[in-house]
Each structure stands twice: as C-alpha cells, then as structure tokens.
Image: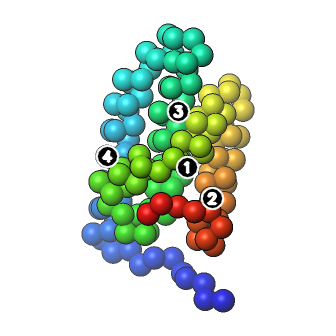
C-alpha cells in the first residue's frame, strides 16, 4: 500500500496557511458575534446558534486537510458552506465544547473525531461533495 508522506511546504505555503487561519478567525468572530443574540430565543434560537457556529468547529478540524488538498481560503469557505456534513459534525461538537470543566476534554475528542472523519474521506467510505 502506497502511503503518502507529509506535504512539502515552502515559505509561500506557510504564509498562505497563515492567512487562511487569520481569515477563518475573523470570519468566525463576525459570525459568532452576529449569531450570539439568537440565544435569546428559546430552543429554536439556540439550535440555530449551534448549527451556524458548528460550521467553524468542523472547519477548524479540517482546515489543514483542505489546505493539503490545495484549497485556498475562498475555496475552503465555499466547500464548508456547501457541505452538510460540516453541520452534522460541528453542531454536536460545539455543544460539547461549551460544557464547563469538560470542554478541554471535548476539544481533544472533537479533534480526534475530525481526524477519523478525514480517514473515512480518504478511504472513500464517507462520501464528500468536492
């Protein structure tokens, strides 16, 4: 079985990944601030808040994978918002990460879950709309 090694990163790729991270953080902060007030509406507002902000947690765990696949910032944004699986992973991950005391533990388990998700994508057992 042919196993690929880590991608070769040069200086240009390092800056590109830095700007992707900065862009992602700015976009996530704007969306989080805009959706914070949804929590004032019981049940449905909270559901929408986690559904929308879950995208960013799912994107955070897949950011380096998408970068290694050659996706730029705009392509990542388009891919993340087009793909429903980011909702499915991100909403429960966001809920788990707000539980006091256990949130640090769940940050690690969400990262592991994201890695397992990437393995499924690479093996072809999880359909991904590219």
Q: CA distance from mark 4 to mark 2?
A: 23 Å
Residue 90 is left or right of residue 83, and the answer is right
Q: Residues within 10 Å of mark 2 (few under 14, many from 20)?
A: some
Mark carried by residue 23: 4
Q: CA distance from mark 4 to mark 1?
A: 22 Å
- Label 2–label 1 contact, CB within 8 A: yes
Of the numbered discs 4 and 3, the one sitting upstream in the chain is 4
In the rendered image, the vertical position of residue 95 relative to residue 75, given as above or below: above
In the rendered image, the vertical position of residue 40 relative to residue 18, given as above or below: above
**Can you give x and y, in whole percent of width and height, for residue 40 in the image?**
50, 10
Mark carried by residue 85: 1
Badge 1 marks a residue whose secondary structure is helix
Mark carried by residue 51: 3
Q: CA distance from mark 4 to mark 3?
A: 20 Å
Q: CA distance from mark 2 to mark 1?
A: 10 Å
Q: CA distance from mark 1 to mark 3?
A: 11 Å
Residue topped by disc 2: 117
Q: Residues within 10 Å of mark 1 (few under 14, many from 20)?
A: some
Badge 4 marks a residue whose secondary structure is helix
Residue lying at 42% horizontally and 28% vertically, measured from the top left: 32
Residue lying at 43% horizontally and 15% vertically, measured from the top left: 37
Q: CA distance from mark 2 to mark 3?
A: 18 Å
Mark carried by residue 21: none
Of the numbered discs 2 and 3, the one sitting upstream in the chain is 3
**Can you give x and y, in whole percent of width and height, for residue 79 in the image?**
40, 54
- Label 4–label 3 contact, CB within 8 A: no
**Can you give x and y, in whole percent of width and height, for residue 125 in the image?**
65, 67
The label nearer to you, 2 versus 1, is: 1
Of the numbered discs 4 and 2, the one sitting upstream in the chain is 4
């Amino acid at each position: 079985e042919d196993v690929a090694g880590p991608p070769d990163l040069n200086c240009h790729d390092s800056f590109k990944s830095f700007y992707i991270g900065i862009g992602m953080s700015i976009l996530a902060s704007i969306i989080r601030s805009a959706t914070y007030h949804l929590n004032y509406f019981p049940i449905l507002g909270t559901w929408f808040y986690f559904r929308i902000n879950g995208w960013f947690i799912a994107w955070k765990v897949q950011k380096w994978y998408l970068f290694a696949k050659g996706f730029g910032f705009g392509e990542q944004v388009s891919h993340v918002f087009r793909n429903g699986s980011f909702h499915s992973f991100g909403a429960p991950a966001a809920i788990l990460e707000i539980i006091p005391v256990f949130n640090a533990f769940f940050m690690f388990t969400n990262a592991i879950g994201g890695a397992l998700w990437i393995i499924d994508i690479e093996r072809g057992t999880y359909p991904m709309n590219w």
